Image (cartoon, rainbow, N blue to C red):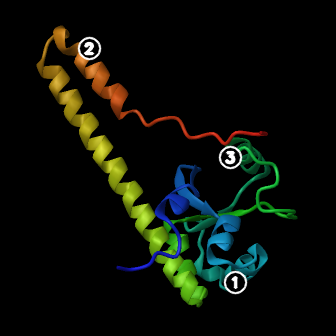
Amino acid sequence: MEAHVVSSECVEGKIFLIRGHRVMLSFDLAELYEVEPKVLVQAVKRNIERFPDDFMFQLTNQEFSNLKSQIVTSNRGGIRRANPYAFTEQGVAMLSGILHSSRAVQVNIEIMRAFVRLRSLLALNAELAGKVDELEKKYDQQFKVVFDAIRQLMTPPPPNRRKIGF
């Protein structure tokens, strides 16, 4: 049985939706790769031609502020002079070409698996929603309660909020 360097739950918890893209942030990636965030960013800047805008972008002050409030932390990533970078799935894949440690390779494999799982879940949910819509059109009002209940079950639960304090 193969040993996983990081858990899939850990990786999936670090994927955010920003500007319509599922992304991972530079400080989270650095943590997973076990490198300093500035080392990761320096490696990217040395290879900037590999990272077009659809692979990586820097968060605006407003985006970073909104994100900090969503993840309920004020010091995420420590003291910083610049806002973090967001890497799309393609950007994360490109990181494997510039980070050469064996850990980076293993972490990238888990990250790619997490992106694929999320994509599959979203496709499955969309397919299921389409089938429910089709069925609802075929049956009369007496089944409305059933379809409403199915839709409620398909709605993802609210994210777990970390408790603050004791």
Disc 3 residue type (three-letter) = Ile
Q: Earlier in the sequence, mark 3 or mark 1?
A: 1
Residue 89, image x and y in percent?
Answer: 49, 66
The residue sitting at 62% across, 81% down in the picture is: 49
Q: Tell me the crowding category of disc 2: few under 14, some 14 to 19, or many 20 or more residues within 10 angstroms, Cα based.
A: few
Residue 63, image x and y in percent?
Answer: 71, 48
Q: Tell me the crowding category of disc 1: few under 14, some 14 to 19, or many 20 or more residues within 10 angstroms, Cα based.
A: few
Q: Earlier in the sequence, mark 1 or mark 2?
A: 1
Q: Quadrant of residue 37?
A: bottom right
Q: Tell me the crowding category of disc 3: few under 14, some 14 to 19, or many 20 or more residues within 10 angstroms, Cα based.
A: some
User: Which callout, 3 or 1, points to the residue nearer the camera?
Assistant: 3
Disc 2 residue type (three-letter) = Val
81 left or right of 132? right
The residue sitting at 78% across, 76% down in the picture is: 38
Q: Identify residue for label 1.
A: 43
Q: Earlier in the sequence, mark 2 or mark 3?
A: 3
Q: Identify residue for label 2.
A: 145
Alpha carbon of mark 1 to alpha carbon of mark 2: how far? 55 Å
Alpha carbon of mark 2 to alpha carbon of mark 3: how far? 35 Å
**Position above or below: 150 against 52:** above
In depth, the one of 59 and 151 nearer the eye is 151
CB within 8 Å, label 2 to label 3: no
In depth, the one of 33 and 91 nearer the eye is 33
Q: Identify residue for label 3.
A: 71
Q: The C terminus lies in which quarter of the figure?
A: top right
149 left or right of 100? left
146 left or right of 110? left
Q: Quadrant of residue 84?
A: bottom right
CB within 8 Å, label 1 to label 2: no
Which residue is at the far front? 166
Task: Look at the numbered disc 2 and give the secondary structure of its residue.
Answer: helix
Alpha carbon of mark 3 to alpha carbon of mark 1: how far? 27 Å
